Amino acid sequence: MNPKAFRTQRLTQGAMIAAVYAVLTWAQALLPPTASLTYGPVQFRVAEALTILPVFTPAAIPGLSVGCLLANVLSGYGAADMVFGTLATLLAAVFTRMLRNIRIKSIPVLAPLPPVLFNAAIVGMMIAVQSPGQPLWPTFWSMAASVGFGELVVCYALGLPLAAALKKATAKSNILK
């Protein structure tokens, strides 16, 4: 593949990942039973399952970051969530990519961990700082635990099966290489 086509392919992959992440998050936010689980201290954001994608392609790093930025436009935390939520996603995607080759029975078992840790720490702190009248550190630990728990459930319960399905689906093609 020539370099120009390769760059175009990566750009397209990143743009598609960004669009899917943002649309999944917005759709979940619009559904009454799941709306409160999309943004806030207890998050089970279905789109976070996509944070496994840096295992397959480096294009997922900017794709997830831009998708998160777009998704957080609707967040009740405003510009802080757009900045710090996106930062958490960017760092998580980079570290997920770095952990892609640590596998047990071909499953990238550590790859979902960076989104859990970075979102717990960064988003937990952002929510704690924006909680007026609350003591910072107890609020941080509470928010970090709740954000981290939701992230853990989604990234492992949805992200790892997604990785297995993508591995199987892409075994005979070069779609995500």
Image (cartoon, rainbow, N blue to C red):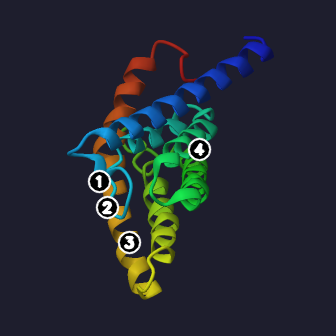
Which residue is identified by label 4? 65
Which residue is identified by label 1? 36
Q: Amino acid at mark 4?
A: Ser
**Does the CB distance between marks 3 and 4 fall below 8 Å?**
no
The answer to whether residue 12 is seen in the rendering is yes
Q: Amino acid at mark 2?
A: Val
**Does the CB distance between marks 4 and 2 fall below 8 Å?**
no
- The residues bearing labels 2 and 3 have C-alpha atoms spaced at a distance of 8 Å
Can you say whether 70 is above or below 57 in the image?
below
Which residue is identified by label 2? 42
Q: Residues within 10 Å of mark 2 (few under 14, many from 20)?
A: some
- The residues bearing labels 4 and 1 have C-alpha atoms spaced at a distance of 22 Å
Secondary structure of the residue carrying tag 4 is helix
Which residue is identified by label 3? 143
The answer to which quarter of the image holds residue 23 is top left
**Does the CB distance between marks 3 and 1 fall below 8 Å?**
no
**Does the CB distance between marks 2 and 1 fall below 8 Å?**
yes
Q: Nearer the viewer, mark 2 or mark 1?
A: 1
